[in-house]
Amino acid sequence: MADAKSRNIGAIILLGPPGAGKGTQAKRIGERYGVPQISTGDLLREHVKNETGLGLMAKGIMARGELVPDDLLYDMVAQRLRQPDCEHGFVLDGFPRTAAQAGWLDAFLENEFFDKIGRWLPIVIEIDVDYNQLLRRLTGRRTCPTCGRIYNFYLHPPLVDNVCDLDGSKLFIRTDDREEVIRERLKAYETQTRPVAEYYASKGRLVSVDGNQPVDEVSRTVFESVEAHAAPVSGS
């Protein structure tokens, strides 16, 4: 682990549909290599909460029911990536979502990071999961309204059907976990993200990982991909 944290892993982007396990793998990458997991959603909320200049502009735009424009998002991402904890690498969560954003990120990293470390064009890991498996993972979810614990009807069921093991509360299905909603989310992901995957595939930087495997096996494959892309810390 100490050796893992002495590596320059560069920029890591995880792609995958809802239910693919991106959040779990992003967290494991961050813990193994000692790098931050950067969510554009979190960045946006932080700027709005702190009423920064960018946050106030974004708040006004969102109040009008409009999407935050790319230029504003780019400024937030650029500010975050310039912070010291990104020096040896980072995991991007929720960015880039379009081919245009991917092109901006490549240009930013080339301009700001190549002179320092090199090999900073991102590696992109796409976690592929069978469609029916995704439906089982997502539609099978049940949540405890009291403690928040999440079960899965197919994979990790409670001891008593539809009852929380910890406090006996009746489990419920979140609106986002209903099958008709999930099918729309998966369709939207495929439409929006496929051009991003194709952009990185055309650059030879897309790595596909079988997400149908057990979580630890997925992590092992992800770590192998990350380390093939990584370089030793300067001077080591």
Image (cartoon, grey):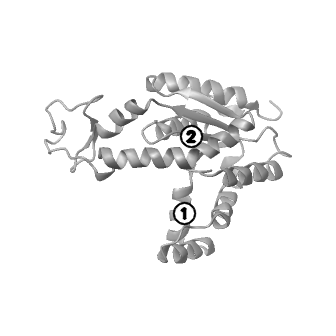
Is residue 36 at least partly visible in the picture? no
Q: Residue furthest right?
A: 115
Residue type, label 1: Leu
- Residue at 36%, 36% in the rendered image: 135
Q: Provide the residue designation for mark 2.
A: 15
Query: Does residue 214 sit above or below 139 in this rendering?
Result: above
How many numbered discs, if any? 2
Residue in the foreground of this view, choosing between 199 and 95: 199
Would residue 38 be found to the left or right of residue 158 on screen?
Answer: right
- What residue is drawn where x is 16% and y is 38%? 162
Residue 43 in the image: state x and y as whole percent.
56, 60
Q: Residue 27: image x %, image y %?
A: 51, 39
Which residue is depicted at the point 67% across and 50% down?
A: 99
From the viewer's side, name the closer residue of 165 and 163: 163
Q: SS class of the residue under badge 1?
A: helix
- Relative to residue 141, is residue 75 depicted above or below? below
In the rendered structure, which disc, 1 or 2, sits on the residue that comes first in sequence? 2
Quarter of the C terminus within the rendering: top right
Image quadrant assignment for residue 88: top right
Between residues 70 and 92, which one lies in front from this camera angle?
A: 70
- Badges 1 and 2: C-beta atoms under 8 Å apart? no
Q: Secondary structure at mark 2?
A: strand
